[in-house]
């Protein structure tokens, strides 16, 4: 059986000086590397979105997007590559600072060719060369991960985005459904048009009709002027209806009529307005159960779900937790101008074992709190302020079955409720979920809320 061929060692060289790029390309190609070149950070990002680059060599000071900003943008997009910076003697402090934020090395100009090849060889020996963890759709959207589940999600987004069909996005609270919608829009033929988001879960039912369809002056008491609705504002773009499972029967009917003929009528108006927009809907509810119970219209569901995308819960892709943790910590530290916080093995093990009922949103919030509260730049589990934080997962006794994921999640929810004196409104933020999602989990696990609460 033949061994699998080694992945091509593609290096991206970025410099605004064509002579430097030529020298880099000649030296690296002669050593057997594949080289792609760019003259600024913006061009580099375009290449990174489409090529499996394994190492970046970039000048620090460039017009437009310089090396430091390029590094920050790569972190924001989840592009995890080793970086070697090129710097003049006067900007060495900047290169040192860049290393603190994740670069692996730097070379001063003019550099020796053999030294360049030696540094590059060291990087490939130590890191194996980086590799874009997911297709460009994921990097651009902010969805981060390396698991099979996330790669499958990325592939589905790539296929769906260019097809002008309605999409239904399903997933628990905090999994990243809005990021999926953003990604689909940005990869679609409508990317130059608006992306209009409607939060159907938080908009009062009495206001939702006016928000979606607009109204004309005098149509009701407070209608002092004509108002264009959000559907109309999404013309030539994408309309994202978040938490679609919350809309009333009357609104379901109005929305169904719009999806059938792409015409709307403002409240109080007799004229119909043609609107050309794509609709992406999302919900964390069991929409099919709602249909079976008669709460949600079946005909509307099938208008919305030309394609269905299921976003996996974080507990279903635990191998992504270290990647996400590193991504969020770097992102937050860069935004706050702080040195990078390190995560010791025991804390990372705790993060990976935690049930995360609030999914990626809860992980991000916990890490931001931990970065602020940690001492000496080292993150401990106690810094995360999570239910059960610092206690660690309980080890089963000899012969005892380990806790299932559901049991771990239930334990975390009970702990949060206890911390919040059994007040659901206060416990929901601790878990990084909405109050509605928490109520669903309480019913799912049969958690009993004490009638008498401790007085504080």
Image (cartoon, rainbow, N blue to C red):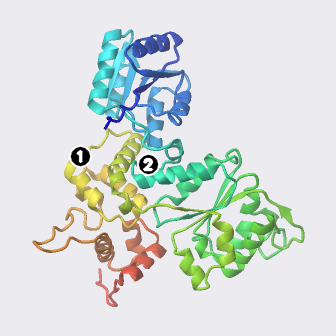
Q: Horizontally, is 312 left or right of 392 in the view?
A: right
According to the image, label 1 marks what residue?
Answer: 378
Q: Residue at left 55%, top 58%?
A: 178
> Which of the numbered marks, if any, corresponds to residue 437?
none
Indicate the position of residue 169 as horizontal and vertical percent values. Answer: 56, 63
Is residue 293 depicted above or below 350 in this figure? below
Q: Which of the 4 quarters of the picture holds residue 217?
A: bottom right
Q: Which of the 4 quarters of the picture holds residue 205?
A: bottom right
In which quadrant of the rendered image does the C terminus lie? bottom left
Indicate the position of residue 196 as horizontal and vertical percent values. Answer: 66, 57
Mark 1: secondary structure: loop
In terms of depth relative to the viewer, which is nearer, 146 or 357?
A: 146
Q: Residue furthest left?
A: 398
According to the image, label 2 marks what residue?
Answer: 144
In terms of depth relative to the viewer, which is nearer, 78 or 387?
A: 78
Kindly tell me whether residue 183 is visible in this rendering.
no
- First reached walking from the N terminus: tag 1 or tag 2: 2
In terms of depth relative to the viewer, which is nearer, 206 or 146?
A: 146
């Amino acid at each position: 059986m033949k061994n699998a061929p080694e992945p091509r060692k593609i290096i991206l060289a970025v410099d605004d000086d064509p002579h430097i790029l030529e020298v880099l390309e000649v030296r690296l190609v002669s050593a057997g590397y594949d080289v792609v070149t760019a003259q600024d950070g913006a061009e580099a990002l375009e290449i990174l979105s489409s090529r499996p680059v394994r190492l970046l060599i970039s000048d620090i000071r460039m017009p437009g997007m310089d090396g430091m900003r390029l590094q920050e943008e790569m972190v924001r997009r989840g592009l995890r590559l080793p970086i070697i910076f090129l710097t003049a003697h006067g900007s060495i402090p900047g290169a040192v600072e860049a290393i603190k934020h994740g670069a692996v090395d730097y070379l001063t100009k003019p550099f020796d060719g053999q030294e360049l090849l030696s540094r590059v060889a060291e990087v490939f020996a130590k890191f194996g060369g980086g590799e874009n963890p997911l297709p460009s759709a994921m990097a651009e959207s902010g969805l981060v991960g390396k698991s099979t589940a996330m790669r499958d999600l990325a592939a589905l987004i790539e296929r769906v985005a260019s097809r002008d069909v309605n999409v239904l996005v399903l997933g628990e609270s905090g999994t990243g459904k809005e990021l999926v919608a953003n990604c689909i829009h940005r990869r679609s033929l409508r990317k130059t048009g608006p992306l209009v988001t409607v939060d159907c879960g938080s908009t009062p039912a009495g206001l939702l009709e006016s928000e979606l369809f607009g109204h004309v002056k005098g149509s009701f008491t407070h209608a002092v002027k004509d108002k264009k609705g959000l559907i109309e504002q999404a013309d030539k773009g994408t309309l994202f209806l978040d938490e679609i499972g919350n809309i009333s029967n009357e609104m379901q009917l109005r929305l169904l009529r719009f999806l059938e003929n792409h015409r709307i009528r403002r409240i109080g108006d007799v004229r119909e307005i043609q609107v050309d927009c794509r609709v992406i809907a999302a919900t964390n509810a069991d929409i099919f159960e709602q249909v079976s119970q008669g709460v949600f219209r079946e005909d509307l569901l099938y208008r919305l779900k030309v394609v269905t995308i299921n976003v996996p819960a974080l507990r279903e892709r635990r191998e992504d937790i270290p990647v996400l943790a590193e991504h969020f910590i770097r992102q937050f530290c860069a935004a706050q101008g702080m040195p990078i916080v390190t995560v010791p093995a025991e804390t990372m093990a705790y993060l990976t074992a935690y049930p995360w009922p609030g999914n990626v949103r809860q992980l991000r919030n916990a890490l931001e709190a931990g970065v602020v509260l940690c001492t000496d730049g080292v993150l401990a589990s106690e810094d995360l302020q999570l239910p059960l934080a610092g206690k660690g997962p309980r080890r089963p006794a000899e012969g005892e079955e380990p806790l299932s994921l559901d049991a771990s999640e239930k334990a975390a929810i009970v702990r949060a409720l206890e911390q919040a004196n059994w007040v659901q409104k206060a416990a929901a933020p601790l878990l990084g979920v909405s109050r509605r999602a928490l109520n669903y989990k309480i019913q799912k696990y049969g958690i009993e809320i004490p009638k008498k609460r401790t007085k504080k």
